[in-house]
Amino acid sequence: MEHCPQLGWEGWFEIRTSEIGYGKALTLPALVQLMDEGAMQNVLELGLSVWDLEPLAVSWVCLRKHLEVQRLPLLGEKLRILTYPAGFEPPYTFRDYRAFDEQGTCIAWASSAWTLLNTRTRRLAPLPDFIRALEKDMPPPQHRLPRPPKRKPPTFPLTPTRSFRIGWFDLDFNSHLNNVHYLRMVLEAFDADFLRTHRLESLDLTYKLEGEWGEVISSEVGVLGKGHFAHGLRRRSDEKVLAFGESRWIPQENP
């Protein structure tokens, strides 16, 4: 789908200096941030943002995300982000994202699964009828991206390679670790040589627990095959897994 559906949002972003990294290209966390910004603008327009839902004591939380990347744009390039709600499987709802370059080529896409969190009990909340009523205006199944896969945690021990303490500026408006920082911590499990010489093809991430201010998180990684890795983010204090996933990489053509 290249055109914006009825309930969708689209907008252009010019890649800024603060969003590029090694190779002068958009970083992976910055790419996901732009997708998330599009999603926020979309729910604001639909009246389904965190502020709109605050009287109901509920807020959106991401449970799973699948990301595929063909290339990362360079400084000054413009990127069109298209995002839209993409169906329900109560208590879950789905959202798709597509990123197009100035030539109209889709260079990255993501699908995600979400649910509502009761902000008082910190437990999952059912989808209200007024939200489920939007399904009739969502794109038909043939125009939606594949659902993010339901993966099981790795069945073998992973190797911890980095640790992070969650800081104040890592938190989002729900007062827990921002989704993008989960992804960043997962990617930081690799050393600089690997990241310099490889390009991410795909990433699956399953969010299990909230990360809170001051907690120390270990980023763990294990090999599943050539260019195929398992990941985990583990809380040091109780050894519980906050998130897990898989990534696939290919050698960079011009590192």
Image (cartoon, rainbow, N blue to C red):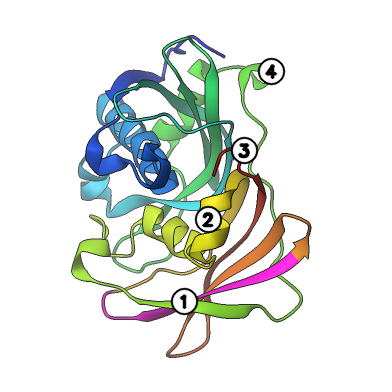
Three-letter code for the amino acid on which mark 1 is drawn? Arg
* Magenta range: 213-223
Crowd rating for badge 4 (residues with CA inside 10 Å; few <14, some 14–19, many 20+): few
Is residue 32 at least partly visible in the picture?
A: yes
Q: Residue at x 26, y 62 (%)?
A: 171
Q: Earlier in the sequence, mark 2 or mark 4?
A: 4
Label 3 to label 1: alpha-carbon separation: 27 Å
* Numbered disc in front, either 1 or 2: 2
Residue linked to disc 3: 253
**Residue closer to the observer: 30 or 233:** 30
Q: For the view shown, which residue lies furthest in the right direction?
A: 225
Does 177 sit left or right of 217 as displayed? left
Three-letter code for the amino acid on which mark 4 is drawn? Gln
Of helix, strand and loop, which mostly describes the magenta segment? Answer: strand
Residue 5 locus on image (x, y percent): 47, 13
Q: Is residue 2 above or below residue 84?
A: above
Three-letter code for the amino acid on which mark 2 is drawn? Leu
